[in-house]
Amino acid sequence: MVKNKYDITEFRKKELSELAEFVADEYFQDTFVCPHRLAKIYGISTSFNDYGNSFDGLLEHKTGKFHIYLNSNKVKHIYEPRLRFTLAHELGHYLIDEHRNALRLGLSPSHPSFTNFSSDNEVELEADFFASSLLIPKSRLLKDVYRRKFSFTIIEEIAAKYQTSITATLIKFASIGNHPIMIICSVDKKIKWFKYSADFPFKYIDALPDFKVPKNTSAGRFFYENGEKCEGEADLVYAEDWFKLYKEEDYGRHFNEYCIYSDKNKFVLSVIWEG
């Protein structure tokens, strides 16, 4: 199995998904999962203020109590998907035994968390995955996608239903095995991070030097051809456009690439799937 520094093991995903599902079913069995209510249930105080660019969220342990700081710098209110995820992430640090005990015993200092999914820190990756699993419990998601052919519309529907970001929704979807996908985040021509389903057929990206985006892709055309976009629909790409291939029969395999663009941040999120 290829080790991806931007992701955690399938075994650990299973553990965290089961923990998140237990919590969701315990307190929100027939209702929308509300991380704000969950913080109150566990007796964790929160504050919502502008902390500049210091962090999106931070869990602090002091004098025997836990407190979560939520940054209002990039959000308008506490129920936005971004902030819901941030709070769920910090609750992950509390609910995951190893994380909570490290803070409580002073073995790990409080540290800033960011919701850009670009960390290669295992603790942050675990909290990210827990957050997506808490907000979108696996059993509920499986019912939502049962016998449905994958398309990006499904991701948009799930994100709207659970009030999660597209990225958080994709990360959870990739873990359930309903249809293998790869998610690639590129910023200013360089691949920032990538994650994929365990059964996605390729694990190695055929990146240009310095981990730059391959040119003959939808993301590549945006970066190298004056911001050319393929919006609202998936673009056809071939396996050799994105991936390192080792078998002759893999050349010419058709894949879909759906891109989400941000001109302001020179950011492209590519979702790739076969079929």
Image (spheres, rainbow, N blue to C red):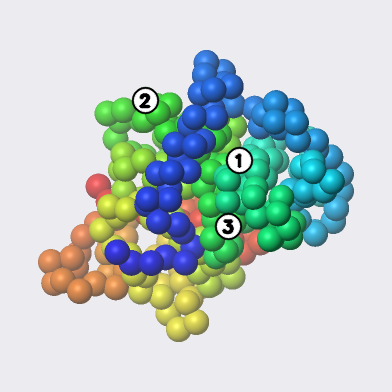
In three-dimensional space, the C-alpha distance between marks 3 and 2, rounded to whole angstroms, equals 29 Å
| Numbered label tally | 3
Residue sitting at x 41%, y 75%: 207
Q: Earlier in the sequence, mark 2 or mark 1?
A: 1
- Seen from the viewer's position, the closer of residues 56 and 243 is 56
Q: Are the residues flagged by discs 3 and 1 in contact, CB closer than 8 Å?
A: no
Categorize mark 2 by other alpha carbons within 10 Å: few (<14), some (14-19), many (20+). few
Instruction: Kindly identify which numbered label has been placed on residue 123.
Output: 3
Is residue 100 shown left or right of residue 186?
A: right
- Percent x, y of residue 272: 37, 54
At a point 29% along the width and 64% down the height, the residue shown is: 1
Q: Residue furthest bottom?
A: 209
Q: Earlier in the sequence, mark 3 or mark 2?
A: 3
Find disc 1 in the rendering and name its residue: 95
Q: Residues within 10 Å of mark 1 (few under 14, many from 20)?
A: many
Horizontal side of 110 relative to 153 (left or right) equals right
